[in-house]
Amino acid sequence: MPTVLFSQGSGIYNYSKIKSSAGSSDRDRAGNAAGWVHRPKLTELITLDQYKFVFGWILLILAG
């Protein structure tokens, strides 16, 4: 638990130091825009049950 708290705390601290996305590159912004446009279509490709099944297997593999 302390390891998780330290990791999350340092991540929150570092994120809070970022003021805006002004430092992002044009490539990053283009990728974000593409994801924003295509994300609804990508979520229609699989059902919630399929997502839960794959996510469960990924968690088991990572736990192993």
Image (tube, helix red, strand yellow):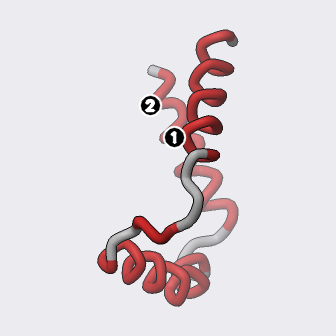
Task: Give x and y (percent) for residue 27.
Answer: 30, 77
Task: Give x and y (percent) for residue 38.
Answer: 50, 86
Against 34, residue 51 (above or below) is above
Q: In front: 4, or 28?
A: 28
Against 47, residue 41 (above or below) is below
Crowd band around label 2 with a 10 angstrom C-alpha radius: few (<14), some (14–19), many (20+): few
Task: Give x and y (percent) for residue 18.
Answer: 55, 53
Which residue lies under the disc numbered 1? 57
Q: Quadrant of residue 13?
A: top right
Identify the residue at horizontal 51%, vertical 68% (top origin).
21
Question: Which amino acid type is shown beneath numbered disc 1?
Answer: Trp
Asked if the residues shown at circle 1 and circle 2 are in contact, with their CB atoms under 8 angstroms apart, the answer is: yes
Asked which secondary structure carries label 1, the reply is helix
Question: Which amino acid type is shown beneath numbered disc 2?
Answer: Ile
Identify the residue at horizontal 62%, vertical 19% (top origin).
6
Task: Give x and y (percent) for residue 12.
Answer: 64, 38
Quarter in which the N terminus is drawn = top right
Q: Quadrant of residue 3?
A: top right
Identify the residue at horizontal 46%, vertical 29% (top origin).
62
Mark linked to residue 61: 2
Asked which secondary structure carries label 2, the reply is helix
Quarter in which the C terminus is drawn = top left
Mark linked to residue 12: none
Identify the residue at horizontal 33%, vertical 79% (top origin).
26
Crowd band around label 1 with a 10 angstrom C-alpha radius: few (<14), some (14–19), many (20+): few
CA separation in Å, label 1 and label 2: 6 Å
Q: In front: 8, or 17?
A: 17
**Residue 21 as seen in the image, left or right of residue 16:** left
